[in-house]
Amino acid sequence: MASLPELAADISCKTDHLVSLMKSSGMDLPSWDENAPAEFAEYGPHAGEIQQTRYALIDQLTQALRLAMGPTEYVKSLISNAPIDIGSMRAIIKFGIPGCVPLGNSDIPIAKVATKCDVDPQALKRLLSYCKTNGVFRETRPGYIGHTAASAALARSDLGRAMQWSVDIPALSGLRIFDALKLFGPCDSPRECGFNLAYMTEETMFEYQERHPQIATLFNDNMKTESGATRLSPKHAAAGFDWSKIGSGTVVDMGGSNGHVSMTISECYPRLKFIVQDRTAEIALWQKQLPEEFAEKITYQYHDFFTAQKTKADVYFFRYILHNWANIDAVEIIRCLTPALKSGTRLIIMEYLGPQGKEMGEFEERTYRLRDLQMLSFLGAQERTLEEYKAIVTRAAPRFTFVGFQTPVGSSMSLMEWIYV
Ligand SMILES: C[S@@+](CC[C@H](N)C(=O)[O-])C[C@H]1O[C@@H](n2cnc3c(N)ncnc32)[C@H](O)[C@@H]1O
């Protein structure tokens, strides 16, 4: 591992390089001002290099931080800060604080926010004082708060609403990993994981959400907002496969939620027809809400992907689905396609791929490992490597032949392609 002075020199070089790439791409330099862009927009001619440099910089800054803190302080911070980080953010989000603080480089007395949001003013002051040390909100003068880039992002976009789901199911399930492993063993079932202990239910998370439509709505909002993030943008679904090969064929978007990914692909490949299948009561509503321009191209179908597929298509597309399921279930989901398959049918799976499939820095691997443990904690599921996905598909339907995979620039997920022979 590099020493602190070596890291500092490297960090300085990487910073210069990143700044020059961003300037030559016409991008704003990073800023924590409330009007700063909420995300890095990594598109344009240097997108790949900007991403690579940024991730390498994050890795080195993290290593330098660890060295500067020392092992004991660092480990203690992991354990002591994490519950209060999530606990304070959960309170801020659930009380709707970001939306009550005016935008426009202005400020507001904390007491006034407390009245508006119906929270004890002293407790709110203490919560905000902690959040401020995480870069969320700033004290503009004694007793007043204003936004930073982070709190403004929560106030301005759908992020705050989408986070309402994240501060509940993933946060509460994550804390129960130990208890679930003790009680259930491997946590490889959606009925035997942290979620079941946190919510005291034998239902899977999806079944539970189906019975609690307000949580299902928050989950779908979260999916939409996640997809709005540059690294998870549905644009990568359009870029990572040459959909023109399918001509005017039919794509079934399995577990396609509100159809946002189908809509994005359709914008780039208007000849394609999409059938969005999902098992949620919201499907009828999505059909009604479909923008006019997609009326001829996209239809919705209620379908449980654990039942035999009846709809014939040229492509079965799974984005962000199989990682929600343990191996035994993932195999079953693919096997259920079999009645509808014919020679030439394609299977496209878009997911995070583990380090075995491609080179990864620590920041990228950390994102992947985070997802993996989230899946363990609330769905009894897992992230996988390329080889693990190949094994699942072969077990489910050996006639599927692997064609290849692509990771579009700027995308966290890769698209893997199989063809039925
Ligand atoms: C993680 S979301 C992914 C949504 C979408 N594919 C995307 O990329 O944004 C998982 C989706 O699977 C759906 N789902 C869960 N269980 C299902 C089942 N048994 N049959 C069909 N869809 C299901 C959920 O309703 C949800 O929309």
Image (cartoon, grey):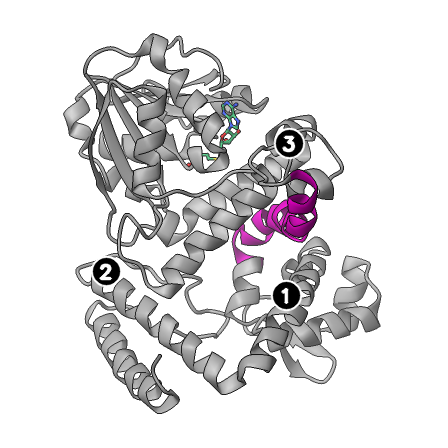
Residue under circle 2?
A: 47
Which amino acid, by three-letter code, is at mark 2? Answer: Ala
Magenta span covers which residues? 155-184
CA gap between label 1 and label 2 equals 32 Å
**Mark 3 and mark 1 residues within 8 Å of each other at the beta carbon:** no
* Above/below status of 208 relative to 250: below
Question: Depth check: 140 or 124 in front?
Answer: 124
Mark 1 vs mark 2: give the one in front: 1
Which residue appears at 67% of the width and 35% of the height? 214
Q: Quadrant of residue 2?
A: bottom left
Residue picked out by circle 1: 82
The amino acid type found where label 3 is placed reads: Arg
CB under 8 Å between callouts 3 and 2?
no
Q: Secondary structure at mark 3?
A: loop
- Of the numbered discs 3 and 1, the one sitting upstream in the chain is 1
Residue holding disc 3 = 191
Report if the beta carbon of the residue with label 3 is closer than 8 angstroms to ligand 1: no
Compare marks 3 and 2 and give the one earlier in the sequence.
Answer: 2
Coordinates of residue 177 in the picture (x, y in percent)? 64, 49
Rendered residue at 23%/35% (across/down): 268
Q: Looking at the figure, which quarter contains the C terminus? A: top left
Residue 355 in the image: above or below residue 193: below
Can residue 62 be seen here? The reply is: yes
Identified at 45% across, 38% down, the residue is 323
- Helix, strand or loop under label 2: helix
Tell me where residue 124 appears, x and y as whole percent: 77, 69
